[in-house]
Structure formats: structure tokens, C-alpha cells
Amino acid sequence: MSTATSMRTTGVLSPLAATTSHRSCGLPNLPTRFSTSSPAAASFTFKLSSVSRRRGQFQIKATSEETPSDGGEILTDLKEKWDAVENKSTVLLYGGGAIVGVWLSATLVGAINSIPLLPKIMELVGLGYTGWFVYRYLLFKSSRKELATDIESLKKKIAGTE
């Protein structure tokens, strides 16, 4: 029995090996890799020829650019911003509260999803509210203007300019 399975395996693998060396699989061949050590030679262009008439030519341009931000620079920027904060305890309290709020909401959603039939009811409520919102604020031009003014006034309240 083991010889039969091994013969099947070789029967499946040997045509695969024969076809990969003589036939193409319909995908363009990958370009050869260049190993260059100079940064000036890192800018190059590949043109991949099409395998069939259905496919067009692809032109890939790879350029080398130095990133202006280094890991050390990011840390120094964060240190400077943290040192500029006056109420560090308030920032930590708000950050901790945000993390607890996200965790609590995820727990609440998980508990609601475990109750049978309640998720479907919540989906219906969400669809109903979405329909009402579209009808109330997005369908007509005058209501869209009203929504825009409401959003702008909310932005001003949050920014403290009002």
C-alpha cells in the first residue's frame, strides 16, 4: 500500500517537474537581481515583457531615497514634545482613560454579540438610523448645508475659538 501511494506521489510530482522546466506558467519572468553597493546605482528601471497579447508591458521604476526620519530622530522629537507638555498627569490620565474605554467597549460589544438574536436587532436599528440620517441630512441640498454648519460649529467649540 505504501508503494502505491509513493507511486502516485511520484506520478504527480514528475510531470510537474517536467513542465516547469519547459513550459511557462503564464506569468512574466522575474527580472534578474542586481547587487550594487553604490547608492547612485540603486536607481534603475525594469521593463517586463508581456507573456501573451492580452497583457501589456509593465514598467517598474525603483528609486532609492534616504528617509529623513531616523529612529533616533523620532525618539528625540517625542522627548521634546513630551518635555513641552505642561500637564503630564492630565495627558497620562486621558491616555489611560482612552485605553480603558476602548477595552470596555470591546468587552461590551463581545457580550452583546454572544446574546442570541440581539445582534440582528442591533443591525436593524443601525440600518434604520442610517436611513433616517441619509433622509434627514444628505438627501436635500438645504439639509446638507445645515449639516455642514453644524459640523463647523462643533469644530469651533472643540477648538475653543467660539
Image: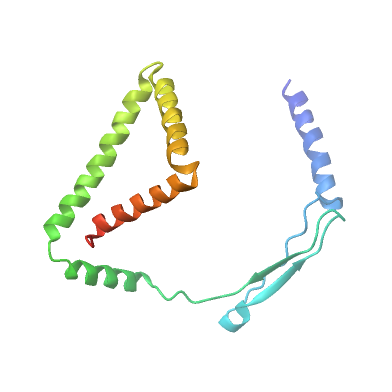
* Left or right of 23 in this view: 1: left
Residue nearer the viewer, 126 or 156: 156
Residue 148 vertical position relative to residue 60 in the rendered view, above or below: above
Above or below, comparing residue 85 to residue 126 in the picture: below
Q: Which of 139/39 is in front?
A: 139
Q: Is residue 44 visible?
A: yes
Q: Quadrant of the N terminus?
A: top right
Residue drawn at x 53%, y 76% is: 65
Q: Residue at x 67, y 76 (%)?
A: 44
Residue 6 appears at what percent x and percent y? 74, 29
> From this viewpoint, which residue is outermost toward the front?
142
Task: Let me know if residue 38 appears in the view.
Answer: no
Q: Which of the 4 quarters of the picture holds residue 124?
A: top left
Q: Quadrant of residue 92?
A: bottom left
Where residue 87 appears, as percent x and y from the top left, is: 12, 61
- Residue pictured at 47% horizontal, 43% vertical: 138
The structure residue drawn at horizontal position 39% and vertical position 73%, both measured from the top left corner, is 69
> Residue 145, position in %: x, y?
43, 51
